Image: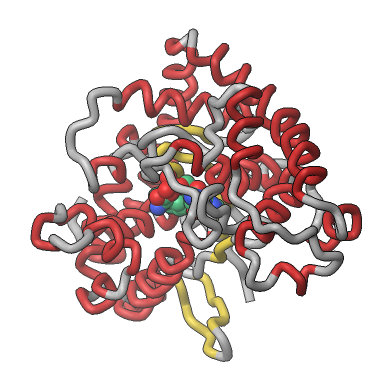
Amino acid sequence: MTEFKPLVFSGVQPTGNLHLGNYLGAIRKFVALQENNDCIYCVVDLHALTAQLVHEDMATQIRSITAAFLAAGIDPKKHIVFNQSQVPQHAELAWIFNCVARIGWMNRMTQFKDKAGKDREQASLGLYAYPSLMAADILVYRATHVPVGEDQKQHLELARDIAMKFNLDFHDKIKPTGLGIDIKVGEEPVHAYFPMVEPLIDGPAPRVMSLKDGTKKMSKSDPSDLSRINLMDDPDAISKKIRKAKTDPDALPSETEGLKGRPEADNLVGIFAALADKSKADVLSEFGGQQFSVFKPALIDLAVAALGPINAEMRRLMEDPGHIDAVLRDGGERARTRAEKTMNEVRDIIGFVR
Ligand code: TYM
């Protein structure tokens, strides 16, 4: 049985400041994966229109995410870094996927329900179709692996459902073209044009929580800036936010079992573990029995040491927008070539005249 060539794809929206959750849940993994994989990393500017249409600072936001990618250590020459709107094939495949996906599937998307809030009638059609564009982002390159935080899991399951339905619906057209690959889905052999994407969600911090409430996700949209550490925060701000982070009065446990029912402790230990490239168990074997008054200063040192250089490099890069734009243009060109190859094959499978 042949296999799809491994290819990593992921995206980040250019909306608001990047925070530690984006870094640990996504960007840090992007950096690690580039060692042994072909990777494509995208600033998903079309997605940014779904919740809010007009962005006064769209260009700055796009450059700032790109600067974060580069400052964190992504190599745009060996891999591809670009912004989504430079590759119109994403939107074209998304349209086809809108016709593949079923309304019932979209209605189950919890992120749509959260983001649309109470007044769903006022949400944009784009917000509703958001996961279909996300599937197109990935599958227009026939990417196989997608590093993301846990909040994106359901969207990636939908991408698998869309890929599977396309493969099955067009089976008789894919097979004779020789473009598909025999893959096993469970016990079933399927002749597939699109791969079944694998989410890469593992690690000690797949869901970084708010510093003010360990039951809420750390988020760009939280009104309290004290709830998150931004990648652009200076050492003083990082230190203040960790010192003020909510905790409970008990000492840290020695085993991960002891973190159950202690969301704030669990979150801080997870952040420490991810930053130090250790497991939570390792962190607890070092700090078990210690008070937060000992743990927090160690976490501050670690966070400042990890984020300080990224922060400085982002600022330096942001002073040369011309350079960032050139990186995006070059990445966009290479991405377009790959995406157009897929789209020509998809057009042939569907039967469009070209
Ligand atoms: P976005 O821009 O909201 O977030 C970017 C990445 O950061 C992760 N993340 C977190 N991880 C851990 N803890 C948190 N508190 C936290 N908050 C955010 C997200 O899971 C994500 O990996 N839909 C995507 C963007 C996207 C995409 C794609 C991703 C569009 N097309 C194709 C992968 C593949 C999003 O809104 O990410």
Q: From what the image shows, is residue 164 above or below residue 242?
A: below
Image x and y of residue 63, in percent: 42, 23
Q: Where residue 19 appears, x then y in whole percent?
A: 52, 39
Residue 242: give x, y in percent of width and height. 64, 39
Q: Is residue 293 left or right of residue 237?
A: right
Disc tally is 0
Q: Nearer the viewer, residue 199 or 239?
A: 239
Q: State the residue in front, 304 or 186.
A: 304
For residue 224, side relative to residue 6 (left or right)? left
Q: What is the quadrant of the N terminus in the image?
A: bottom right
The residue located at (23%, 79%) in the rendering is 104
Q: Is residue 280 above or below residue 246?
A: below
Residue beneath the point at 57% across and 90% down: 187
The reply to whether residue 51 is in sight is: yes
Q: Quadrant of residue 149?
A: bottom right
The residue most toward the bottom is 187
